Image (cartoon, grey):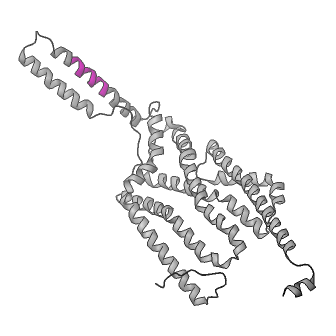
Amino acid sequence: MPPIRPVGHEDRLSLIEHLDELRSRLIVCLVGFLIAFSVAVWQNHALLDIVNRPLERTTAATAKKASGPLEQTARSQVRLRRALERGADAFERLASSPSLTAADRATLREAIRSYGQAARALPDSVPGRQPVTLGVTEPFTTTLTVSLWFAVLFSLPLFLYQAYAFVMPAFKPEEKRVVRPLMLLVPLLFACGVAFGYYVVLPPAVKFLQTFNASSYDVLVQAKPYYSFVILSLVSLGVLFQIPIAVVALTRAGVVSVKQLRRNRGYAIVVIAVLAMLLPTIDPVTMLLEMLPLLVLYELSILLASWLDRVTARRERAAALAAPSDPDESADAV
């Protein structure tokens, strides 16, 4: 692999040199992805715990009222544990009676130990449920799939940096001042979208979907569809959080203006509502939760594009004032 050297804006590379640089950067991305994937496979239990947490919390919170046979069995086990604990306490008080013989006291001590062991083997509260697997290979393939998606997430900063380093020499110095902050915002906005989806969107979405008409179903969640639902929701929100980047790019390219964005705000709201509706989280409450940050990001992107337009206009005026206006002065300066 040829070494990756910095390329300046004034450098002129041949097609072969560009392809060599692209190949080198792709190899770096591949190596970084393989390292991230290895770490994700190594820590797959911790990653699965993170993804399972919304489902476990929802099922644990709703199991107290659910009427399915699994929930009834779990509640019965909790009640049985409490009954065994009370029985062990009663035997403990009875064993302290001075009127008992040594044989009776030994029998009670044995019963206390048995009751305690049986009570400790039962749950002290209704536990949350984890996704179930049905196929022979599903635990293995599903674990690899989740590790793969986390590896992509971990490798994203490296991918973006390599893309940034490859295309940045094509920009002029004054263009770099605009592009560089936008490139840095991409992973930050993506991480914010994923965090918002995990902490704000997923819990109410899972709760609504799991408890909807739950009295008519014995709800079991299969691992593969559940992980696909979670990953697609988080990735979609991470991508949708790139609205400021898209809006600023369109305004800087001259495709739309800030005035058009403000004038067509109603159409933007409709588009954002449609995008929120197309996400896997299909309930109306979650759709509103998804729309709110997208609308805020749209308004912030308008403010950012307007600010960049003012900065560009000031620089152009300063450059025009600094440039000599008289041809004779230009000739003298030369």
Q: In the image, what residue occupies the spot 44% across and 48% down?
A: 52
Q: Is residue 84 magenta?
A: yes
Instruction: Tell me: residue 134, above or below residue 120.
Output: below
Q: Position of residue 96 (x, y in %)?
A: 16, 14
Instruction: Tell me: residue 75, above or below residue 299.
Output: above
Q: Out of 84 and 65, give the one closest to the viewer.
A: 84
Quarter of the picture containing the C terminus is bottom right
Q: Position of residue 36 (x, y in %)?
A: 43, 65
Instruction: Tell me: residue 72, above or below residue 89.
Output: below
Per the picture, the main secondary structure of the magenta-coloured stretch is helix
Q: Out of 250 and 57, give the one closest to the viewer.
A: 250
Q: How many marks?
A: 0
Q: Position of residue 205 (x, y in %)?
A: 56, 44
Q: In the image, what residue occupies the spot 64% across and 45% down?
A: 289
Q: Out of 73 and 26, give the one closest to the viewer.
A: 26
Q: Residue furthest front?
A: 332
Q: Position of residue 258 (x, y in %)?
A: 81, 60
Instruction: Tell me: residue 42, above or below residue 118.
Output: below
Q: In the image, what residue occupies the spot 88% across and 87% down?
A: 332
Visible residue check, residue 299: yes
Visible residue check, residue 273: no
Q: In the image, what residue occupies the spot 76% across and 70% down?
A: 253
Look at the image and give the residue range highlighted in magenta.
Answer: 81-90
